Image (cartoon, rainbow, N blue to C red):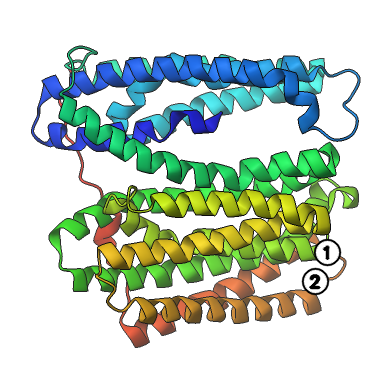
Amino acid sequence: MNLTELGFASAVVYSMYKPIAEDDKDTICALLNFYKRVYFIIGLVILALGTAVMPFLQHLIKGNIPQDINIYVLYSIYLVNTSLSYLLFGYKNSLLNAHQRRDVISNILTITQGLMNICQLLILVTIKNYYLYVLMMPIFTVLNNVMVGIETKRMFPEYSCKGKLDISVKKDIRKKVAGLMISKLAQTSRNSFDSIFISAFLGLTTTAIYSNYMLVFTSLTGIINVITNSMQAGVGNFIQTESPEKNYELLKKLALLYALLIGWCATCMLCIYQPFIKTWLGEAFMLPFAIVIMICAYFYLLISGHGCSLFYHGCGMWWNGKYLAVTEAVINIIGNYVFVKNFGLYGIVLATIISTLIGSVWTLCILFKFFFSNKKMIKFFLFEVFLAFISFVLCCLTLFINKITVAQESFIKAILVTGFSATVLFFAAYMLISKLLHLQIPLKIFRHKKHNREVK
């Protein structure tokens, strides 16, 4: 269902940058009107496709289903929740995104998600009804969208849904959507298809246990994405104002920053994952340590390439990478199907690692071909390998320190020992490499241009 939006929101927001800079209110209103109509169609398509999938739900689940749970009712609630995110004021997010006011969206989401979590917790503790627990999702989705709509109207009263777009603008949006759609296919296939294959071949129990580990995984990636998103505008401006040579130096600095930051995160995950799961859920919900190693390797491969991704998105290379996304998605799906039969859960994670590695290398090739003109690509690739090796060595040292000082998977002691040793080792490595290679990060890429608007 997540594939239905096809990256349309990003293309429209990208198309708003120029009219906003030129204060072209008519074009912005026309884009908003176009966005509203398309999002309404997307919401209806999701409802139709989701309803069509319902007869096949049984075939996507292996093993028994709890007798007191109706999967069709639960699925319907999830389906309505997804549809409402498009049908009800979802298009108004574009104005905030285009004006670099994601902070407003984040603040509203924090409020609604916090209230939803509190209500869900109270329902689980008191009423103990899972249907009501899930029903909180569409209720607070509506609340979130209504609050965004009200706040957008207050901040931008001059914009409304009216007017028509030129054919040339629509063609440009279609081309961007085509490239973004394929990229989104790859991103969605990583975890969504993993869960489907685990459920279909290994059962719901394994899916639930694996999902607990991925909850930690996605929480960390979400935090790191905040850092990445905060730099995107700065990197985009740097691309437009500086020479390719200076951009290459910035790319190296970002590669160093991400490699050691993600190396530190992966190391902490490797040492703390098992004690955390044991303390939180118990030994029955723990996966083998080999799976944990593979998950941490996947985490490093996925996030360490964010430096290249900043330049990839800053240059708008979505259409250039159309074949990359298709190949990555196909390799992941085929790998899941082939490997899960022979290696079980190990095969699922292995297929994801292979597809992610191919995608990262291919992204690097596209970036250097169309922006850096293939100059220094091999040199930069070897630099990335060097950073990965440094992270691996420091991870092994931290794991060794953890093993000889932490007994019986003590959660608190594991946090203290791992946190201290990993921080010292990776910080020292970053300072040493950045000094030797003169790769200090310029702070200006974290700064956003503030939009001072008069609100009537």
The N terminus, quarter of image:
top right
Check disc 1 and report its element: helix, strand or loop: loop
**Location of mark 2 (residue):** 406
Are the two marked residues, 2 and 1, in contact with CB atoms closer than 8 angstroms? yes
Q: Residue visible at 77% across and 53% down? A: 340
Residue 5 relative to residue 122: left or right: left
Identity, as a three-letter code, of the amino acid under mark 2? Val
Q: Is residue 159 left or right of residue 87?
A: left
Q: Which is nearer the eye, 154 or 285?
A: 285
| Mark 1: few/some/many CA within 10 Å (<14, 14-19, 20+) | some
The residue shown at (40%, 36%) is 7
| Residue 441 shows in this picture | no
- Location of residue 226 in the rendering, given as x and y in whole percent from the top left corner: 43, 48
The numbered mark at residue 409 is 1
**Quadrant of the snapshot with the C terminus:** top left
User: Disc 2 on helix, strand or loop?
Assistant: loop
Q: Where is residue 229 in the image (x, y as percent from the top left)?
A: 38, 48
Identify whether 382 is placed above or below 244. Answer: below
